[in-house]
Every structure is written in structure tokens, then in C-alpha cells.
Amino acid sequence: MNNTTTNADSALVVTRGLSKSFANNKVLDGIDLTVNKGRIVGLIGPNGAGKTTVLKCLLGLSTYQGHISILGMNPLRQRQQVLQDVCFIADTAILPQWLKVSQALIYLQGVHPRFNREKAERLLEKTSIPLDKKVSQLSKGMITQLHLALVMAIDAKLLVLDEPTLGLDILYRKEFYATLLNDYFDQDKTIIVTTHQVEEIEGILTDLLFIKDGKLILDTEMEALEQQFFEVKLRPEQLEQARKLAPISEQAVLGGAAFIYEKRPGDTDLEQRLAQLGNTTTPSITDLFVAKMQQR
């Protein structure tokens, strides 16, 4: 991320001044981003914030203004080379309905030089997906499992996931992320994921991005959150004193209110002032997301 020292060996994704407009509507507005290898990055934002547009630009699926480097390559001019090391799972299944599972394995073995059919078969053995069934005969959860097994069997350096568990029940969602961590991710691979189920990926992320109206409003490592954001729950008689410390969020709770504060440059004694009010904790990603989206 931007607050991490990077070098040519570790930076997989670099954008500078990334912008995109449709007619007179600017959907991306000067995004600067650095993603290193061995990271799991959550790109979080409301509908229409620009999440999918960022991913399409990174993958060379959309034109843009500014600079993008993926593994040192330009995704528009060198898209074929980029896709040798980048895999993508979209929010909607794109596998042909007439295709059998066994045929998908044969096809990928023939067209992708880094596809490992044996690994794909081992991953599918952990599911209830029959090899002789067509995609049209599979449930939405099974199609997502199939797509994930095919992608994870490709030796790619970057995996891009756009709302990968959209519409799945909680069991499939938990299984999806468990498989991702146990059978795919390592320190040489990087994952970028967008999702609306913020609370489900909180425990696996190394880096966090919030996007609002086409701009990044938060770019941080998960380890830095506890030094940057603070939550304190207070009784009614303490509320006015808490408001004087300029919280970014105030939420009513039983018996009082919960305040979220952001430490800004030069604000050296925020923790001490908050400690005089009560015990501070690190806010959850969900609460922090709501606070930052509502912040003026």
C-alpha cells in the first residue's frame, strides 16, 4: 500500500493518477495505489463508488487516464502477457451453460500454459460437483466453487475477485474464503477482493482500501488501524465533552453513544485525551466503513 516502502521486486500493482470518465461523469478521480506481493487487499465501497471500474482498468478491460503498471506491464498494451499472471473472478458466473465440468478441465489444460489439471481435480474432490454435469445443472454455489477451483489451479501471481460470493449463502461464503486461504494464498501471491460482506473478510485482510465517489478515502495496512482509529463508548453526561474532540462518527448505543476518532498528522495526544473519557478500542471494519462513508 502507499504507506509501505516498495521496490521493483515487491510491487505487483501501481497506479498513479488513475482516472476514468463516462460522458461528463467522473467515476475514478486520481487514484494512487501500490499493492505489494503477498498481500490480501480489500477494496470496499458502496454501489457506484468505482470498485469494479478500478478492477476493469487494472485488467485492461477498460480505457483510463493516468498510469497503471501490473507486474511491470501496461494492461492495455500488454494485456495478453498480463493475463498469464493474473486471474479474475467476477460477480456473475461466465462459464458457458452447456459446458461439462470435465470439458472445462480439458479446455483450460489446452489453452492456459500455467493451468494444473491435477490440482483442479484435487480441489473439486473436496466439493460435491460431479465431473459429468453441465454448468446449467449446477447450483450457484457449485458454479462459484467450480470457478474458484479452475482459477486456483492456475499458477498466477495476482488474483482479482469482484464480489465473488454475491448471492451465496453463509456456508458457501465461509467455505470460499477458507479454500482461498488454505489452497491458494502464499507470500508470493496477492489477492485483491471487493465485497459487500465486509465483516466476512475482516479476518483475512492485510490491507484495506475504502473508495467513495471515485476517490480513495482510506489506504492503510490492517496492522496500522489500532494506531489510527479509536472507538470509545460513553455515558450521556460525557457526550458534549466527546464531541469537542471532533469524532468522525457518533452512533447511539444502549446507555449512551459510541464515538469513532481518526488520528491526524500532528495530533500527538489524541489517545491521552480519549483515555480520560473512557476505555478505547479499535473499531470494526464495518463500523469504520460506515463512519468514513458518512464523514463530510
Image (cartoon, rainbow, N blue to C red):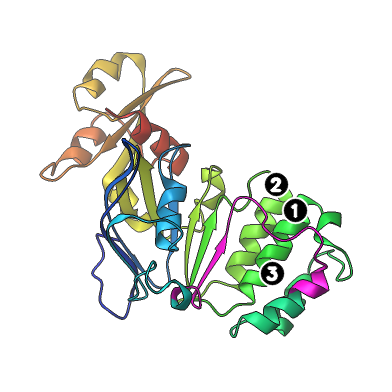
- When asked about the image quadrant of residue 239, the answer is top left
Q: Is residue 168 above or below residue 238?
A: below
Question: Label 2: how many residues lie within 10 Å, few (<14), some (14-19) or many (20+)?
Answer: some
Q: What kind of secondary structure does the magenta stretch mostly adopt?
A: loop
Check residue 168 in the rendering and tell me which mark sits there, or answer none: 2
Q: Which residue is mark 3?
A: 149
- Name, please, the residue furthest toward the top: 237
**Circles 2 and 1: CB atoms closer than 8 Å:** yes
The foreground one among 233 and 106 is 106
Q: Say whether disc 2 or disc 1 marks the residue closer to the N-terminus.
A: 1
SS at circle 1: helix
Q: Is residue 87 above or below residue 201?
A: below
Tell me the CA gap for discs 2 and 1: 6 Å
Q: Say whether disc 3 or disc 2 marks the residue closer to the N-terminus.
A: 3
Q: Is residue 125 visible?
A: no
- Name, please, the residue furthest toward the left: 266
The structure residue drawn at horizontal position 73% and vertical position 50%, both measured from the top left corner, is: 171
Residue type, mark 1 in image: Gly
Q: Residue 160 location in percent, x, y?
A: 50, 62
The foreground one among 34 and 100 is 100
Residue type, mark 2 in image: Leu
SS at circle 3: helix
Check residue 141 in the rendering and tell me which mark sits there, or answer none: 1
